[in-house]
Image (cartoon, grey):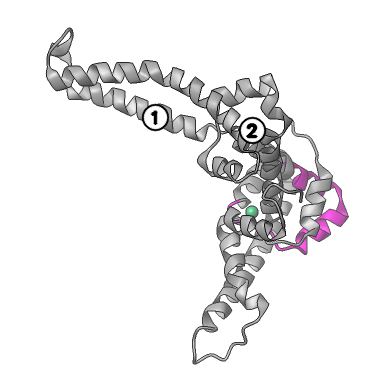
Amino acid sequence: MKYELDTIPVWDALRAETECALCLLERRSRNNALRYFLGPAVMAPEVRVQTNQRGFAPHNLRLLAKDQNKLGLALLAHTRLKTLRAHLAARSAKLENLASKVSTKTGPGAAWASKPVVATQAREFANYLRQQEKDCLIDEKVGNDLERYCYTVLQLWKEDPDFRRTWEAGKGLCLHHMPSVLEMAAAVLDARRLGEFLVGFLALQNTNLARVENDLLGFTQTFDSTHSREITGNTVAALNRALQKTSGEFQEYQEESKARRGPLLGAH
Ligand SMILES: [Zn+2]
């Protein structure tokens, strides 16, 4: 697969010195996608064809619902629901037909109606609904952006000594985003560079995981009267840093900090 370089946002995210540059890039990418789908795209027929056929995952819909553009979301949701209901109608009718036969044991085909037949159809219906929930246009955009950013990280690491120094002096990545970089490194680096990158990256990750673990221990000890740890801003923030390091940035935290600064989908 061919990827494009996108160096400016990657450099900006690394210079921000957060616990994970990809968390920051993912947040920006998601906010761009949220703005896109509630912006002029709402009235674009080609976009509506897409949003009618494929919706948004619940975690993205929750963020869209917090935006002030209620009419935009209502228009999207209305035609999506209309399309979805048309797709559901045939499946629903088939399941209902089988269910009524097995429940009453009367009517055409009732003799062969059995629980396994109905159960299989019910599971297929459930799978279809689950698939609709997972097939998300916003997650697809964010996923494509993240692949491009991972590719850019590795190209910059390979080509730009200044980037390599900044990367190696940084705080590494969270464990949620680490797999994406490992996979991209395996895909795009030659043997020698892959080895070199992995040695440095694993050491960087170990150093920074040990740091947040140690800071977290310090935070827990501030609750223990036998320790006289001083409570500082650094100690209080240790829990959030550790949670981000293990699981990626929590959108709730960002929403709260954004709420203090201004509109949810405001510019970053
Ligand atoms: Zn991350």
Q: Which residue is at a point 62% across and 66% down the rendered structure image?
A: 241
> Hey, which quadrant is residue 13 in on the image?
bottom right
Q: Earlier in the sequence, mark 1 or mark 2?
A: 2
Residue sitting farthest toward the top: 108
Residue range corresponding to the magenta coloring: 151-176
Q: Which mark is residue 72?
A: 2
Split into quadrants, the picture shows ligand 1 in the one at bottom right
| Residue 147: quarter of image | top right
Q: Residues within 10 Å of mark 1 (few under 14, many from 20)?
A: few
The answer to whether any part of residue 247 appears in the image is yes
147 left or right of 161 in image: left
Amino acid type indicated by mark 2: Gly
Q: Residue furthest front?
A: 71
Of residues 226 and 187, the one drawn nearer to the viewer in this rendering:
226
User: Could you say where residue 56 lies in the image, as x and y percent from the top left?
Assistant: 55, 35
Q: Is 240 drawn above or below residue 79 in the view shown?
A: below
Residue at 21 percent across and 24 percent down: it is 116
Q: Secondary structure at mark 2?
A: helix
Provide the major secondary structure of the magenta segment: helix
